[in-house]
Image (cartoon, helix red, strand yellow):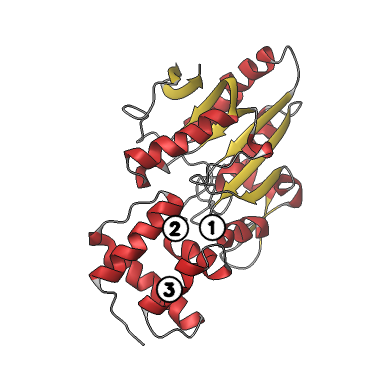
Amino acid sequence: MARELSEATFQLYSEFIYDKTGIHIPLTKKYLVENRLIKVLEEYNLQSYDELFHLVRYTPNGKLCVRLFDAITTNETFFFREPQQFDVLVESIVSRVIQYKKGCQDVRIWSAACSTGEEPYTVSLVMREKRPFVKADILGSDISRGALEAARRGVYNSYAVRNVPEAYMKKYFTQQGQDAFALNPEAKGSVRLTDINLMDGARRPELENMDVIFCRNVLIYFDDRAKQRAVSILYDSLRPGGFLFIGSSESLHNVTRAFRPVTFDKVLVYEKV
């Protein structure tokens, strides 16, 4: 088995992954791609990175391509990440959504690139606790089917739940073994999970007329062109006046002027205009 990924073959992977996902992987990350793909070679009993690329390239919608994306994408996240944003959601944004809908208590929320589910499940928990009379329709999506399967299982380690308030832990989680905490079925049942590629560009009926979108710590993996493609999909998915949350270290500056920056309690949110 070929254990070394040549620069030429790496470039083929890099271009393919960028075209399909928008994720830019520089040459300095070749070792990372090499280390992650060696496991795929072993799983499928393949002899080289070139053989793997050939199979992926000519069956781009097959299981092997899905496995490639699972191997490449970064899925590190945790519950209550950037908690001030969730406070703004339940204390300010939801009220504006209900006002816009003339009193209707239905709120549609999309957690894009949700990885293993911690973000949409956090939304579910805070809505249950802070806005119990609001019907929250929460969609979680990711390109990685492996991450989505983990989200459906809803079992997390201590790192993932380290920021969960004690009252939430007691109410919504059950410890299973030394380092496994299972989210209860009721909280999981509030979230629908599906695989969506932000670079796909296809109109999806389930993404239309969203009131709120979370797409946090995702754009940092894209170059400007890919950011524009992804943000365009997010923009089209929001109804007029809808709100977009991105990571606190991210910005839409030089990406688009289609959103109006709005600040709630020092938290920056983008409103569709």
Q: Residue at x 37, y 82 (%)?
A: 48
Label 1 sits on residue: 144
With respect to residue 244, does 61 lie above or below?
Answer: below
The answer to whether 106 appears left or right of 219 in the picture is: right
Do labels 2 and 1 touch, CB within 8 Å? yes
In terms of secondary structure, where does tag 3 sit? helix
Q: Quadrant of residue 191?
A: top right
Q: Residue at x 25, y 74 (%)?
A: 6
Instruction: Choose mark 2 or mark 3, whichever is in front.
Output: 3
Label 2 sits on residue: 73
Q: Residue at x 70, y 48 (%)?
A: 188
Q: Where is residue 39 shown, x and y percent of the image?
A: 44, 77
Residue type beneath disc 1: Ser
Label 3 sits on residue: 54
The answer to whether 160 appears left or right of 34 in the picture is: right
Do labels 3 and 1 touch, CB within 8 Å? no
Do labels 2 and 3 touch, CB within 8 Å? no
In terms of secondary structure, where does tag 2 sit? loop
N-terminal label among 2 and 3 = 3
In terms of secondary structure, where does tag 1 sit? loop
| Most foreground residue, 240 or 132 | 240
Q: Where is residue 248 shown, x and y percent of the image?
A: 39, 33
With respect to residue 269, does 23 lie above or below?
Answer: below
| Most foreground residue, 19 or 39 | 19
Residue type beneath disc 3: His
The answer to whether 119 appears left or right of 184 in the picture is: left
Residue type beneath disc 2: Thr
Q: Which mark is residue 177?
A: none
Q: How many marks?
A: 3
Q: Quadrant of residue 71?
A: bottom left
